[in-house]
Structure formats: structure tokens, C-alpha cells
Amino acid sequence: MSATTTWIVVAGAAIATMALKAVGPVVLGGRPLPDRLTRIVTLLGPALLAALVATATFAVDRELVLDERLAGVGAAVVALWFRAPVLVVVIVAAATTAVLRAVA
Amino acid sequence: MSSERTARDGMRSVAPLAIAVLAFGVAFGVLARGTGMGPVAPVVMSLTTFAGSAQFAAVTVLGSGGSAATAIVAAALLNARYAPIGVTVAPFMHGSVWSRFLHAQLIVDESWAIAAEGDGRWNPRVLLGAGAGIYVAWVGGTTIGVIFGDLIGDPNRLGLDAAFPALFLALLAPQVRTRTSVAAAVLGAAIALALTPFTPAGVPIVAASVACLIGLVAEDRP
């Protein structure tokens, strides 16, 4: 790929991301949201984080697949159940998946 | 008590996550270098875009021969969730427009999750400290990946693609303490999976935001 293409993408991705992150704080900054809206945005965390977990576990491009990642995430659930620290949870998931890949 | 958390508390809470993010940064550096972006562009991208999944997506599109426009749209779609995320923290960001703009750049999934106080409140100082910690780890990891890519090889051999959902799961766990929040999580995951086969990456995540509308109908009990 050409250097021009590379730098166009670097600049374009940066501008788009900066704008998306800043639009809420710049437009609404410092003003409280209406009560009903607060009740909704409180649930945005669970909804978005669960969506990220689900797609990162099952999606490869536009396909849903069952592979070694699921075993890793399963091991992470067990580690969380036993209240393991975050870093342990992440390492357990990676190690489980890596071992299964190595033996497969 | 928790409303008095400081930027330093944010940095302390984010340290274990930052180690994981450093590893993701290394993986991004390796991938980007492998697609022929050269050594400088991936690091500049981590400095200026600072959003892991979007950077992976943009570089993957480029690496598979896609156009610049497609790569930028992919990155924007994956980061579209930051618009509603920005709205959640907006009421707690004071100061000038520039200060709010810069502060907002430290919003990533990890810093946002750590800064949550529950009850729809977010701590801007924790967001700042946690965001700064993740930023250093992400940029540092990218630099390491770009420089030592040849020695590291394929990061997925080490199960890094499973570490990613595990990290988000660990961030999700403290946020599902009520029946309504569990329902929002299940619904969000279901929407994202249902749309995955039919839409470009990123759209399923944004669409999952709709799940939080159940807050309008459900009464929240622990």
C-alpha cells in the first residue's frame, strides 16, 4: 500500500474518533441529563460491554464461529467466579486458548 | 466515599488492565508493521486515534487491499459507540470547551468502565487517571510491537484474541448487580450477535445500545 493511503487513513481515523469521543462532552458538558435519560445511560455500560464480549468471543468478520476463544472465555468466567484479579482472568483466558490451539 | 476517588485511584485501578492493553498494543504494532504501514504510522495512529478495536479494523481493511475510505469508515463505525459513551460522562465534565475536548480523548472502554460510580454517575478524575494509564500502555505497546515484531510472531498463537473478550467480561462483571442491568447485558449481547452476519463490524455494537432502553420500562431492583 502507498504511504499516501496509509497517512490518509491515520488522519481520517484520528479525526473521526476524536470527534465521536468529544461530541457529548463538548456539546453537553457540565449540564445534568434529565432523570429518564440518566436511567437509560446507566444501562449503556452493561449493554455495550456485553456486546463487546459476545462479538469478540464468537465473531470472525461477519461469521459466528465456535473456536478456542470460547474455552478461554469460559475459563475467564470461572476465574471471575472465584474473584480472581483482572490480570489473572485475562491470563487464564489467553493461556487456555493458547494451550488448546497448541494441542489441536 | 467512592465519589471522592482521585486520578491516582484511577491509575491504580487501571494498572492490571494497562498490562493487558500493553499486550494488545504489541499485537497491533506487529499486525500494522506486517501490512506494510512502516514503523512510524502505526505509532502515530495509536497516539492520535487511541481506540484499539477501530485501529485493528482499519489496519486489517488496508492489509486486505481495501480502500482508504473503507478503512476510515470501519474505524468510525467501531468507534461510533463513543458518541453515546461521551454523553454518559458529559454531565461530569466541567471546564472550557478545549479542556472538555482533550479530556474526552481519554475515554476508552476501560477508563469509562472504571470511572463508573453506579447510579448513572461517572468520576471525571478517575476517567483522567485511568485513561492516561491506558494511553501510555497502548502507545508503548504499539512501539514495542513495531520494533520487535519479527521476534514476536503471531500474537494469536498466545491466545491474545481470547484475552480481549475476557478483559471486557471482567469490566462487565461489576456493572451487572441488578436485574435490569443483567437484562440490558443479555439483550445487548443478543442484538450484537444477531446482527453480526448482516452488517459491517461495529454496527452490531452500536445497535446493542438500544438494549439500554429497557431502563424506561423496567423498575430497578437489586
Image (spheres, coloured by chain):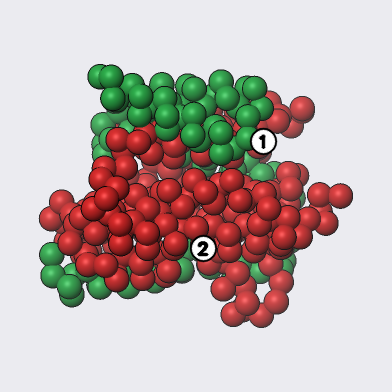
Q: Secondary structure at mark 1?
A: helix
User: Which chain is in red here?
Assistant: B
Q: Residues within 10 Å of mark 1 (few under 14, many from 20)?
A: few
User: Which chain is in green here?
Assistant: A
- In-image side of B167 versus B32 (left or right): right
Question: Residue type at mark 2?
Answer: Val
Please tell me which of labels 2 and 1 falls first in the chain: 2
Q: Which residue corresponds to the image point at 70% horizontal and 30% vertical from the top-left?
A: B177
- In-image side of A5 versus B101 (left or right): left
Tally the marks. 2
Q: Which mark is residue B174?
A: 1
Where B16 sits versus A103, above or below? below
Judged by depth in the image, the label closer to the viewer, 2 or 1, is 2
- In-image side of A60 versus B3 (left or right): left
Residue under label 2, please give it.
Answer: B136
**Residues marked 2 and 1, same chain:** yes
Q: Chain of mark 2?
A: B
- In-image side of A44 versus B23 (left or right): right
Q: Residues within 10 Å of mark 2 (few under 14, many from 20)?
A: some
Q: Chain of mark 1?
A: B
Indicate the quadrant where residue B58 lies. Answer: bottom left
Question: Residue type at mark 1?
Answer: Pro
Outermost residue toward the front?
Answer: B151
Residue B106 at x, y = what percent?
56, 64
Q: Which residue corresponds to the image point at 81% horizontal and 49% vertical from the top-left?
A: B2
Residue A103 at x, y = what percent?
28, 19
Q: Which residue corresponds to the image point at 42% horizontal and 70% vertical from the top-left?
A: B48
> Foreground: A63 or B183?
A63
Residue B152 at x, y = what percent?
29, 48
